[in-house]
Amino acid sequence: MISLGLVILVLITYWHVKDFEFTNFDDKIYVTDNRNVRSGISKENIIWAFNFDHKNKTYWHPLSWLSHMLDVQLYGLNPGHHHMTNVIFHILNAVLLFLVLRRMTGAIWRPAFVAALFAVHPLNVESVAWIAERKNLLSTFYCLLTLLVYAYYNEKPRAGRYLAMLFCFALGLLAKPMIVTLPFVMLLLDYWPLNRVNLHQPDRSHWRIALHLVLEKIPLFLLSGFSIYLATTSLQGSGNYISLQSVPVSLRIGNAIVSYLKYIGKMLWPQDLAVLYPFPETVPLYQSLGAFLLLVGISILFFTAHRKYAYLMIGWFWFLGTLVPVLGLVQAGIWPALADRWAYVPMVGLFIIISWGLTDLSRIYCIRKTGLVIGLLIAVCTLFAVSRNQIRYWENSVTLFQRAVDVTENNYIAENNLGQALMLSGKAAAANAHFNRSLKINPRYPTAHVNVGLSFVQQNKPEQALQSYAKALAEVPDYAAAYNFAGEAHFLLGNIEQAISNYRQAIDIDSTYADAYINLGNAYFDLEEYEPALAGYQKAISIDPTYAKAYNNLGNFWYRTGHFEKALPNYIKALEIDPIFAEAYNGAGAALVRMGEPHKAAVLFREAVKIDKNYVAAQNNLKNTLAALAKIKK
């Protein structure tokens, strides 16, 4: 019944995510713009998931890639279903957490409260509501499954159970190497609640038992070490590591120490949560030193109390230890000061302290069970309400990054992503304001320069766009997208030869750049050089067979060259991939008109207008086709 209650609690908390969109922050890399993921499960894609290609500068975590592929295989690119898969994994994790603590401690209500806190705490919203964070949910699922098998192994040590435990742990590492500290956690659990070693035995036999327990974990530690090696090796040569010159060791250590207290603060008072907290330029010495002394003081206090209140020490070192992989001592990619998602597993240690601690306090101060239960219910309901409020910020990229801009300072990445989201919704002027704010904070941010250029193009100012692309290329000379977009600007200005040169520069940098091949085809078509134009479209399709835009452009090619019967299948293929592709509906309808089937064409034109009410070409085609049909009928 408790497990069922946890299922219902999570569903009620996260039900609305089924109506949410993909975000423009990593969801493109993991799903929407990833041609391997978009094409679903296949032999080639499985090999890709396990190989060491840089994969947009992400580290090696093949099981997470396979999970996203399976989602696409089952649901296509419906974001609501991808969100609900995350919710399902969070449900499984909450239930598994309850079952693990129930099995290990023999208690019922204290594990239930820990699981309830885990199920509804606002800090966990990021891990659940962010599709790209499937890796966090998946690795935690196998982490908790490993602990559950370990609990059974502790009751009856058998080779089969030990191998099952190793297998589950390996799967968790394949999903995300965040759980490399799990063997350390298992050693803590050996002391409490499993009581596999008693450090206070007078005959000192506990040292022999402790050594045995350490040796027992050697295969697990080896798996952890191998996982770390694979993760770091997969990033070598990607240019994704942040150098010690950019972020010195002293700053990394200072931020790591202070972030421990920030996590505790956000756990106790979860307000001003954001998808990205900018890494600080400095950390005052008094802050890092004060935080260090406080952490050491708490550690000593809890250690001295371990005989009577062992859960204090175990929960505290669970929290400290499991955060180590994400403290930022080694940094790659966009590294924040801290992240809500990184607290997903570490917070369990603090929840254990709270749950068992409140029970002991109620007994010490003679608080009635009824009062304790009411207090705990109020706490869960309060966290539920805060989480429901936090979840709504994940509805789309605009709401997500507007929130980040509102509650953080000097967040140039959030400003850029907010502008990007506004630009996609047609608000170029508002978007440009956010891009400029991003550049004011960080004038050397190449992505913002490119986005300023794109906003100028949207405002029909390609000359100004070229200036922004040049600034981006000054910062990153091998920026393929900047060359591609510069080519588009030159194409709008009628500089076709220069556009072709830019597209080829983009392709030289990234030979798998499908959009650049499509644009190259468009440029050659404009010059009436049909053979290289066709080659460009076909190359884009060979690179990404699931790219609807490539099929649509190939359909346009055949239509404009008078081969309507060849154009139609390409438009249909584009619609099979993307059922809400208004331009493909319009193109297919135009081809059917030329093939003498205006009745079918009218249906497609209607669909195009239904998808995009501002699609003038489709509106005119529908109007003309209906008029022609009326004449035929008359």
Image (spheres, grey):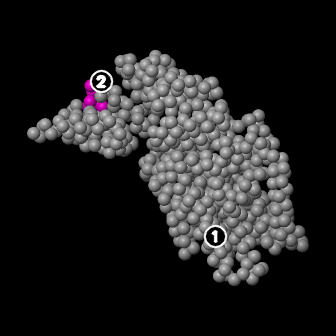
Placement of 523 over or under 403, stated as above or below: above
Please name the predominant secondary structure of the magenta segment in the image. Answer: helix
Placement of 182 over or under 566, stated as above or below: below
User: Could you tell me which residue is drawn at 27 percent across and 25 percent down?
Assistant: 562
Placement of 172 over or under 475, stated as above or below: below
Front position in the image: 543 or 276: 276
Q: Which residues are magenta?
A: 562-567
Residue 397 in percent (x, y) is at 53, 46
Residue 147 in percent (x, y) is at 66, 63
Which structural element holds mark 2?
loop
Location of mark 1 (residue): 379
User: Could you tell me which residue is drawn at 40 percent across and 28 percent down?
Assistant: 537
Placement of 386 over or under 135, stated as above or below: below
Q: Amino acid at mark 2?
A: Thr
Residue 451 in percent (x, y) is at 54, 33
Residue 496 in percent (x, y) is at 44, 18
User: For this view, does 180 lie left or right of residue 472?
Assistant: right
Using the rendered image of the protein, determine whether residue 154 is visible from the camera's viewpoint.
Answer: no
Residue 432 within the magenta-colored segment of the rendering = no
User: For this view, does 100 lie left or right of residue 255?
Assistant: left
User: For this view, does 299 lie left or right of residue 358?
Assistant: right
Location of mark 2 (residue): 561
